[in-house]
Amino acid sequence: SRLVREGIAYARSAEVLEEKRQTVSMNAFLDSIACDYQDIGKAVSFIPWQGNDHFSVRRQALRRIMTNLLDNALKFGNQATIVLSAPRQDQVEIHVRDNGPGLAENELQAVLAPFYRVEDSRNRHTGGTGLGLAIAVQLVQQMAGTLSLSNRPEGGLDAQIILRHRDS
């Protein structure tokens, strides 16, 4: 049933979003997501941006993206950190960093494809459907953004979302 639910979510994420963009305080939005995880005992922290943090996003889509990334980070590491920055006025960067083992270089791009799984067991607790990151990629692309993964020098993975301001 989990595979069916994720398959339906993946198919829906391929559709053009009808959700309207809203200007939000990214600090408040991302902090609320971190707090939701903290409320259920998960080690998720948030490092806010000190500059103008107001940005136009599709809130539901971004919440789904963040949930998928944080769930993965906590699955492979025991803590996650959300970092917000806005290096340019028309762009926002969100990083989800974990302290897990990272990925082999040849898997950094592969895990973003549908049904690709690093952990290939059929165990419900350790194996996933291989759709979470693919859904996140589609939703980010629909918001004129990119999602990329890189290994952190100190260990762990860094999932970087770059969103560009766009009217729609």
Image: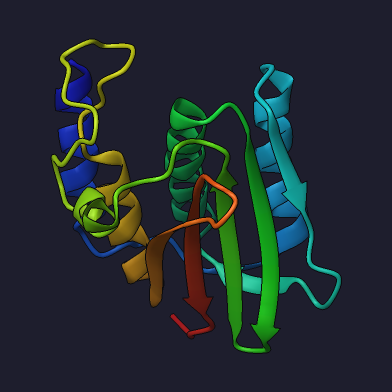
In this view, 122 is above or below 149: above
Q: Residue at x 72, y 26 (%)?
A: 38
Count of marks placed on residues: 0
- Residue placed at 74% from the left, 47% from the top? 46
Tell whether 103 sits left or right of 28: left
Quarter of the image where the N terminus is located: top left
Counting from the top left corner in percent of width and height, residue 132 is at 30, 40
Q: Is residue 71 above or below residue 28?
A: above
Colouring scheme applied when the structure was drawn: rainbow
Residue 79 picture location, percent across and down: 62, 32
* Outermost residue toward the front in this view: 154
Left or right of 12, for residue 159: right
Residue 35 lies in quadrant = top right
Q: Nearer the viewer, residue 10 or 79?
A: 79
In the rendered view of the protein, which quadrant contains the C terminus? bottom left
Q: Nearer the viewer, residue 107 or 14?
A: 107
Task: Residue at 54% x, 67% y: name it.
Answer: 57
Counting from the top left corner in percent of width and height, residue 166 is at 48, 85
Q: Is residue 117 left or right of residue 50?
A: left
Which residue reaches farthest bottom? Answer: 89
Q: Is residue 147 above or below residue 70?
A: below
Residue 39, image quadrant: top right
Q: Residue 67 location, x and y as percent?
A: 49, 39
Most foreground residue, 29 or 91: 91
- Look at 53% across and 56% down and name the residue there: 152
The quarter of the displayed image where residue 24 is located: bottom right
